[in-house]
Image: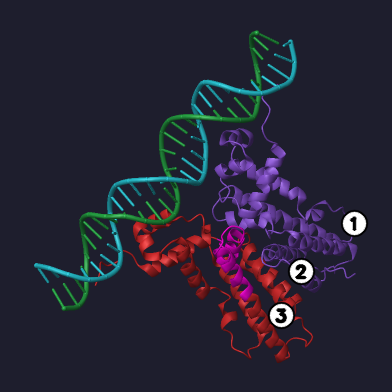
Chain colours: A red, B purple, C cyan, D green
Amino acid sequence: MARPSKFNRDQAVEFAMNAFWKEGYEANSVKALSEKLGITRSSFYNAFGDREQLFDEALALYMRGSPDKALKEAVPGIPIKSLFTETFRTICKVRAADPEGRGCLVVNGVAELCGTHATLGPKLQAAMLANVKRFETLLQQGVANGELAPDTDVHTLALAVKNLLVGLNVLSKLIHDEEELWRTASTTLRALNLLEEA
Amino acid sequence: MARPSKFNRDQAVEFAMNAFWKEGYEANSVKALSEKLGITRSSFYNAFGDREQLFDEALALYMRGSPDKALKEAVPGIPIKSLFTETFRTICKVRAADPEGRGCLVVNGVAELCGTHATLGPKLQAAMLANVKRFETLLQQGVANGELAPDTDVHTLALAVKNLLVGLNVLSKLIHDEEELWRTASTTLRALNLLEEA
DNA sequence: TCAATTTTGTACACACATGAACATAACAGT
DNA sequence: ACTGTTATGTTCATGTGTGTACAAAATTGA
């Protein structure tokens, strides 16, 4: 029904995700991305609207595959200590396995764009705060389960866990050894009484 | 002995520090900075060499005034739990008091530049790792003091504390309430047995 | 084959950005 | 006044970056 596209749109979004992840938002201009994708800027604008919309798509793709997605999908009633333990273990593995040490796209984005970008800044910020809410719900389940003490301050504990997660995602840009990352994470997790000891 | 400068160099470095802090490195071009300083690019290059050298100076200035400087200056023999406690308390206060919620220049810089900048990336990275070493030394003092158990894994604990600090500096970009930041920090600090309870 | 559709390719206009070159201006000391 | 010194102002050259405009190309279905 129309002229066929020269490139695979999904692959392009994935490529952009990896580029934003490694080098940030501003370092990837429409010009640079287009050239790397082997398409003209004309095709870029036609396919994606503008760079910000492509970032939105890349962010959505990232979220779908991010190592903490288990926390978002977890069903009610599941033991939450093992859920947190397994998830942090996975995060350490995935972050250490990244040969480019890119950390987390959302955390990088918050650091880069919160002070500058009028729409992406708040969007990334909201994504991170939604995560805290999610943690609260899970910890509340832990209280209901009897895994955590009834008087647990779930809001504050959720923030402490989020803090651990964010810190780990930054540190993984400097520390590439999985076991060292895990020692760091598990030390705090154990201290917070959220580690399921094997 | 020569034509006098139109602007105050120290003030310009401070201005640049604040600009880099809020908006990052790449968002502050020589052109933009020069215009904001009310000087020509010619004067800029003459005074600072290039943007990277100015960033170096801004970074040094930042380090001299950063809220964790107490940890760098601490003398041997001082009780380390109260040192960490006071320092983290100060960090929460200072970060929450920043109306622009900029977090930490070094952490922001690591997030922005580690994957892109050939010289500043490693420099910022090194600054952060030096901090971990410093924490190790302090914790070792805590062991010697008897404040911490003799079998404490000071390296891992230092990483956990650094993780807390880094996470807090990112979270402070989203959470602007001092008490909420402090509840987050003190929860982890207490769990790690590093909180000096008043 | 023609028409409708959508992608491409090319061009234009403009602003941003770097860095160097070079003349000019403003000072201090003699 | 003259000289040396350093900052400033202006210009040049070159490349990057955005967004739009419009013609040409490649497909499908009638």
Segment tinted magenta in the rendering:
A101-130
Residue ID for mark 2: B185
Q: Are marks 2 and 1 in contact (CB under 8 Å)?
A: no
Foreground residue, A26 or A84?
A: A26
User: Which chain hosts label 3?
Assistant: A
Q: Marks 3 and 2, Cα distance to the nearest angstrom?
A: 16 Å
Q: Measured from the top left, where is residue B74 in percent x and y?
A: 85, 54
User: Residue B77 — which label?
Assistant: 1
Q: Does the magenta stretch include residue A126?
A: yes
Residue plotted at (39% across, 67% down): A11
Please tell me how crowded label 1 is: few (under 14), some (14-19), or many (20+) other residues with Cα within 10 Å. Answer: few
User: Which dot, 3 or 2, sits closer to the camera?
Assistant: 2
Q: Indicate the quadrant containing the C terminus of chain A: top left, top right, bottom left or bottom right.
A: bottom right
On the rendered structure, is A66 left or right of A30?
A: right
Q: Distance between the residues labelled 2 and 1?
A: 24 Å
Q: What chain does badge 2 belong to?
A: B
